[in-house]
Image (cartoon, rainbow, N blue to C red):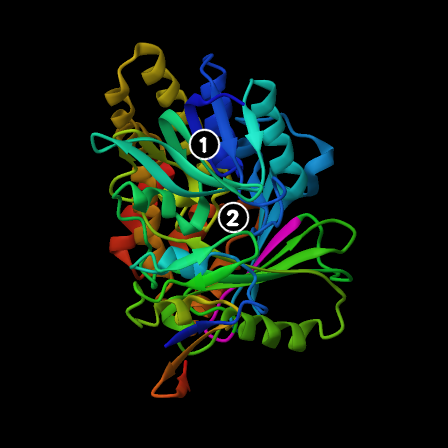
Amino acid sequence: MKTSYDIIVVGAGPAGSMAARFAAEKDVSVLMLEKDRDVGYPVRCGEAISKAGVEEFIPSDEKWIAAKISKFSFNAPDGTEVILDFGEAGYVLERRIFDYELARTAADAGVEIVTRAYVNGLLFENGKVCGVKYEHQGEQKELKAKVVVAADGVESRVGRWAGLKTHIDFRDMESAVQITAANIPVDQNALYFFFGKDVAPNGYFWIFPKGNNKANIGLGVSGIIGKKKSAQSYLNDFMNKHYPNAPVLTTIAGGVPCAVTLGKISAPGILLVGDAAKQVNPLSGGGIASGMIGGKIAGTIAAEAVKMNKLDHILKYDKTWADRLGKRHETFDRIKNGIYNFSDEKFNNIAHAVNKIPYEKRTLGKVFKTALFNQPSLLIDVAKVFII
Amino acid sequence: MIEILPDKCDFCGCCVGICPEDAIEMKEAEIFIIDQRCTNCAKCVWSCPIEVIKFNKDGVPVK
């Protein structure tokens, strides 16, 4: 290990690994510190991602594909099912393998990685971040860096220590629980979404297949709902009703920041990526692909800054992110706020209306148009998403 | 007073991300509230997906 690095990345999830890799590919020295004992574990994720989202970063590989997705199944509160066909749309991942592979690509690019390294503070010089404090093997240590990349997930404490306001409003946090269960006989090529106040108020309940009739089953609830009833309690109700005897292979909790990107994701000496920057798609709650994109942009800009010996260059990150995805997420967030306020009756009516569209003519765009027929202001937002 | 039950915690980080005061310290399998910073706002209680954070007001647990 060196005594100082050009770039130190805190957190080895997809966003951290991609920040580290794209920086190292520009020939700067990069260290990535992971708090947990393993990269990629525990998995706190529904694990669904689009094929395009993956392949911008790593070629598809059977070893981390649990299921190939070609259909979406949307389920209204009254049980009406709307099926949409997408062709080869995406995957449900084995993230414990996928994240490992992403970190491996970073290592191949020259990144040094240390696990069980708990970052607990930042170093400053003239008000600028210039390194990290961390605990490793029982010792408190310090390391200097020209740029720190905070990829510390939903907790997002590293950014706070740099003076950024990273904590999330309790209304925007989707507090989630998920089990991976066996003997769930659903279509292994379809993602299932369930809506309604009984199953997942202000959000959705999901069943994502993982092959051989295994599935990730879970939901997230906003803090507003969580005040009255926890995510765990909703999950228990669903399982008791539909799959009372399903063998449970994994039980996990997690938080998804479903909001627009933080107002500021850079400060002198530091960049924030992934969940730590709230780069999650606020409509779907998906954050793997967008986190990797944020990581790639941050890693590239940080390395350029180091190479040019012009560290102010990193402050361009905010705008580059906004242009690539940030502005789009603002539109998604408005749509989310519209949809989450739909009544059960409205969901039912939409499902009935969409099912009148012939199956082969159903597209996500048409579904949205039908869904938002009575909500003209939202229609404009939806149109933007599909036109841009 | 807010209390986290560490033996039931999954260390998912929801409460840490929500806490406006940065008053929750969480490592790989260790969690505690930094009492000097906690304002008893209870947002962490509402955000916990598995109900392992309890808020006792005047000795009475409230959700």
Q: Name the residue under label 2.
A: A362
In the picture, measured across the screen, residue A58 lies left or right of residue A170, that is right
Identify the residue at horizontal 52%, vertical 71% (top origin). B5
Q: Which mark is residue A9?
A: 1
Which range is magenta?
Answer: A190-198
A177 to A45, vertically: above or below: below
Q: Relative to A349, say whether A162 is above or below.
A: above
The answer to whether mark 1 and mark 2 are in CB contact below 8 A is no
User: Which residue is located at x 44 percent, y 15 percent?
Assistant: A28
Query: Tag 2: Cα neighbours inside 10 Å, few (<14), some, or many (≥20)?
Result: some
Q: Residue at x 26, y 25 (%)?
A: A316
Q: What residue lies at 69% left-to-right and 56% top-to-bottom?
A: A215
Q: What type is the residue that disc 2 sits on?
A: Arg
Q: Looking at the image, can residue B60 be seen?
A: yes
Q: Does the magenta stretch include residue A211?
A: no
* Label 1: element kind: strand
In-front residue for pair A244/A29: A29
Q: Is residue A32 left or right of residue A184?
A: left
Residue A213: which disc?
Answer: none
- Say if the magenta span includes residue A192: yes
Residue sitting nearer the eye, A216 or A10? A10
